[in-house]
Amino acid sequence: MLYQLEQSLRSITTQRTHWNIYRGDAFQLQLNNPEQLFKTAILVYLHLKASGYELRQSMALGKIDNPRSDIKTATGSAFTLSGQGLDKIANQRFIINIAEQQLDESLSLNLAFVDVLLTKITLKQANALYVYLTKADNSHAAVAKELKTSRENVTKLLNLAHYQLIERFIKYTQQCIQKIIAGSK
């Protein structure tokens, strides 16, 4: 698990992103581009799911009072809220808390639906969806070439993974986060 988690984080994050792994099965990730929060969470989930692992993630939008290159020692509401979310996550795969704001009900409901969709996908569907969401050329033919399978098989896998709904959700959350950030200034 530790190796796969590290590979997932290296594959998905950028140089401007800070992360740490704890106890081999837990990690903390700080994004400098909050609009990418849900997309990054989904990509980490898919990357690990494609390798046979399940994952629960507590996300938070908040301040970082004391930024550090080693985020284990950083402080702020983002870290506090994320930790509180882990305590409450139960059977969900994703939970989010926002500093000084109530979570919008439509965002919460959409997150619950995506949680259910992603929980039900297979390893192959997760892998196909991961490749689709990360490649610049994400045509079904290009994804098929990457996965060394037929275009028809990729289309089937992506449809079963509800790729269009996942993609719409990611765009929706990016807009939601932009509004949240604009409202907190």
Image (cartoon, rainbow, N blue to C red):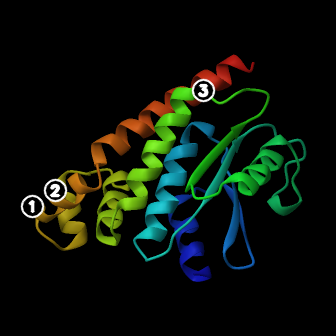
The residue lying toward the viewer, choosing from 38 and 9, is 38
The correct choice, above or below, for 10 with respect to 31 in the image is: below
Q: What is the quadrant of residue 19 in the picture? A: bottom right
Which secondary structure lies at badge 1? helix
Lateral position of residue 22 relative to residue 128, left or right: right
Q: Do the residues under discs 3 and 2 have CB atoms within 8 angstroms?
A: no
Amino acid at the residue labelled 1:
Glu
Asked if the residue under mark 1 is in contact with the one under mark 2, i.e. CB atoms within 8 Å, the reply is yes
User: Mark 1 and mark 3: span between their CA atoms?
Assistant: 38 Å
**Residue assigned mark 1:** 152
Q: Earlier in the sequence, mark 3 or mark 2?
A: 3
Which residue is at the front of the view, 117 or 152? 117
Q: Residue 30 location, x and y as percent?
A: 70, 52
Residue under the image location 58 percent in, 65 percent down: 9
**Residue 155 - label:** 2
What separation in Å lies between label 3 and label 2 (alpha carbons)? 33 Å
